[in-house]
Image (cartoon, rainbow, N blue to C red):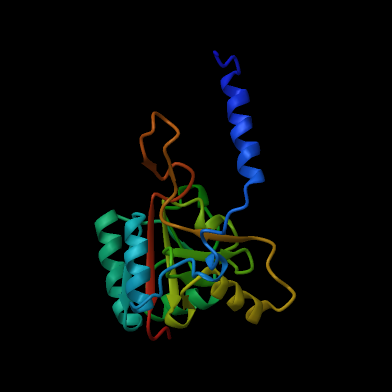
Amino acid sequence: MRDNTTAKEQMLKKIRKALLEKRENPYPNLEDTPLYKKNIDELEVLFAEQLTAVSGNFIFCEDGIDFIENMLQLADKFKWRKIYCWEPELQHFLAKYEFPFYQTDKDFEQAEVGITMCEALVARNGSVMVTNEGAAGRRLSIFPHHHIVIARTSQLVLDLKDAFQLLKNKYGNQIPSMISNITGPSRTADIEKTLVLGAHGPKELFVFLIDDFS
């Protein structure tokens, strides 16, 4: 006899049958299984690998002199002239080595580089956690074509949960209103599936990890 049931009815029949049949859980210990494999690499190595994989640039510096030497090379390579830095600690750091920069937002529409600090570096996915709590605010990490992040080795953590713990330790109950994770340069593939960097923000991201930041 010919079966006149539709494909939809057959599918629903199979679903009902499957729901009625009791089967053992094929993954009984799934909730206890770690989401990631245990990391055996140094955090610096893991962060550098993940950041590079998303088209970011990682530079490790032993001290301030090493950082300034790298900055001078980058400034010469990209012909930077409009470099902005608004955080007092960084301004003091750059001024100590007589590195030229803009302290205010004068002619900010012409900004080529924004230098900021960060809250944490997340090694697991090569992300930079920033907030609006610092003097750099929101604009300096978004508007210029090149974003330079300066971080201490103590700000390098494995996972996002560790980064949020740093925030909690630092701010207590006064958590910043804006928390963002930057994972590589701004990008989009909306137009014909072609990846374009710098579509909605910086097209180059440089992360300087400084061992002795003074």
- The image position of residue 39, as x and y in percent, is 38, 75
- Residue 132 lies left or right of residue 113; in this view the side is right
Relative to residue 109, is residue 69 depicted above or below?
below
- The image position of residue 76, as x and y in percent, is 26, 60
- The image position of residue 65, as x and y in percent, is 31, 81
**Residue at image location 59% in from the left, 34% down from the top:** 14
Q: Nearer the viewer, residue 127 or 11?
A: 11
Image quarter of residue 12: top right
Identify the image quadrant of the C terminus: bottom left
Answer whether residue 209 is visible to the viewer in this image: yes
Image quarter of residue 94: bottom left
**Residue at image location 48% in from the left, 78% down from the top:** 155
- Residue 107 lies left or right of residue 78; in this view the side is right
Q: Nearer the viewer, residue 102 or 174?
A: 174
**Residue at image location 38% in from the left, 69% down from the top:** 47
Answer whether residue 98 is visible to the viewer in this image: no
**Residue at image location 38% in from the left, 79% down from the top:** 210
